[in-house]
């Protein structure tokens, strides 16, 4: 890298470059961290497809930095005799031909570190780890057990990158998670690549940083939503329209159900301000009531103030056209795709 080239690179560019050059980033084999994440991405990996995108993200780089700092501290503690000499730190394992790198194992406990956003952490605290995290950590545990080691507890330390808040999940080893993970891999292997589901949306962080993004969504109509490739692959307009109608019915029913249940449970709310958590006998989650009085922009007053000052309210035109799609009665004047003019 010449001095000029270095000066032109932003810090973000350098961090992504550092990440790309790490041997782990160059691993092209399907790994335990991809279990349960996206069937199509797993299919590309298992088929040995060459990545079309560099992948990686700044959030992932921050996570890698945190992992490296934790591993360095653990190695120092091990060198000082403060954790056992046989503790495994950043250790490679394999189970059923799938490679993984566990963060820490001090018999009989396996610990994994996961960095996340505060928003996602709040969800995790309510719903617990997703299947993909359980399958990944149980994959490590299965590999250790196959080596003749004991695994009693699996610990996942979640750390929010934006707030620094930590939340620890602890569970017992459950072989059912290993069976579920292997069944998932078997299903992916048995499905032709082109038929594998795209498990994430193209505008999600998952797809934005996926090494197969271009390949996965190629075939979409130019100037149209990347998901138009789904129609190209399955041009059954009536089926897609039915799917849209069905989704909207379920959504409105779910919203009505949510309003009804939330209203009924307001009977148990003990607070008129602040936060209170209420246990629900016979249900495995508690109810957390947060009563706040958020300030919202008074758009009516803003418009009045601008009008009084004789100035137009500042607005910004969306760079991308917004598409509204409604289901309406079909009349004789409607456009028929591919029909006669
Ligand atoms: S681009 Fe998205 S849907 Fe496609 S393989 Fe990658 S993660 Fe899956």
Image (cartoon, rainbow, N blue to C red):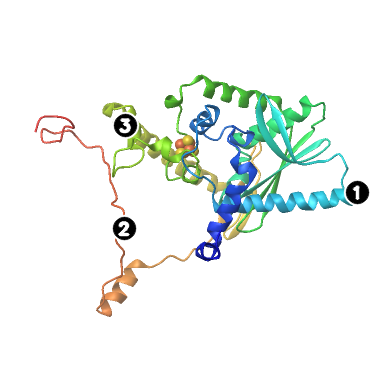
Tell me the residue that label 1 is attached to. Answer: 81
- Residue 51: x and y, percent? 49, 38
Residue 200 appearing in the image: no
Q: Answer above or below: position of 159 versus 37.
A: below
Residue 173, labelled with which disc? none
Considering depth in this image, is 227 or 325 the residue closer to the camera?
A: 227
Would you call the spot at circle 2 few (<14 residues within 10 Å), some (14-19), or many (20 or more)? few
Would you call the spot at circle 3 few (<14 residues within 10 Å), some (14-19), or many (20 or more)? some
Q: Nearer the viewer, mark 3 or mark 1?
A: 1
- Residue 36: x and y, percent? 57, 32
Q: Answer above or below: position of 126 versus 134.
A: below
Circle 1 — which element?
A: loop
Residue at image location 61% in from the left, 44% down from the top: 124
Residue 99 placement: quadrant: top right
Q: Residue furthest left?
A: 341
Circle 2 — which element?
A: loop
Residue at image location 63% in from the left, 47% down from the top: 22
Give how far apart the Cα atoms at labels 2 and 1 are. 60 Å
Tell me the residue that label 3 is attached to. Answer: 231
Tell me the residue that label 2 is attached to. Answer: 318
Considering depth in this image, is 86 or 180 the residue closer to the camera?
A: 86
Q: Residue furthest bottom?
A: 309
Quarter of the picture holding the C terminus: top left
User: Mark 3 or mark 2, which is nearer the start of the sequence?
Assistant: 3
- Residue 290: x and y, percent? 57, 55
């Amino acid at each position: 890298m010449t001095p000029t080239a270095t000066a032109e690179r932003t810090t973000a560019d350098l961090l992504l470059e550092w990440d790309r050059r790490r041997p782990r980033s160059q691993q092209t084999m399907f790994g335990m961290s991809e279990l349960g994440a996206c069937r199509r991405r797993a299919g590309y990996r298992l088929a040995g497809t060459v990545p079309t995108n560099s992948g990686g993200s700044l959030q992932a780089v921050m996570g890698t930095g945190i992992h490296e700092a934790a591993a360095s501290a653990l190695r120092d503690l091990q060198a000082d005799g403060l954790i056992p000499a046989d503790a495994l730190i950043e250790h490679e394992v394999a189970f059923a031909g799938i490679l993984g790198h566990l963060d820490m194992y001090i018999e009989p406990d396996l610990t994994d570190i996961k960095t996340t956003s505060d928003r996602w952490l709040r969800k995790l605290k309510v719903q617990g780890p997703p299947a993909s995290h359980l399958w990944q950590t149980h994959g490590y545990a299965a590999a250790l057990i196959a080596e003749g080691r004991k695994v009693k507890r699996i610990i996942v330390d979640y750390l929010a990158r934006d707030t620094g808040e930590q939340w620890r999940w602890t569970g017992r080893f459950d072989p059912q998670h290993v069976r579920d993970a292997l069944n998932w891999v078997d299903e992916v292997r048995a499905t032709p690549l082109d038929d594998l589901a795209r498990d994430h949306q193209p505008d999600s962080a998952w797809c934005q940083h996926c090494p197969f993004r271009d390949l996965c969504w190629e075939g979409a109509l130019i100037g149209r939503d990347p998901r138009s490739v789904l129609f190209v692959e399955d041009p059954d307009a009536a089926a897609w329209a039915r799917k849209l109608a069905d989704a909207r019915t379920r959504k409105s029913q779910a919203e009505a159900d949510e309003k009804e249940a939330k209203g009924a449970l307001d009977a148990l709310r003990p607070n008129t301000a602040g936060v209170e958590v209420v246990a629900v006998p016979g249900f495995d989650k508690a109810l957390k009531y947060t009563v706040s009085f958020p300030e919202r922009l008074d758009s009516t007053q803003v418009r009045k103030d601008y009008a009084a000052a004789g100035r137009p309210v500042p607005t910004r035109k969306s760079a991308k056209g917004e598409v509204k799609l409604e289901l309406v009665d079909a009349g004789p004047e409607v456009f028929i795709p591919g029909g006669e003019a």
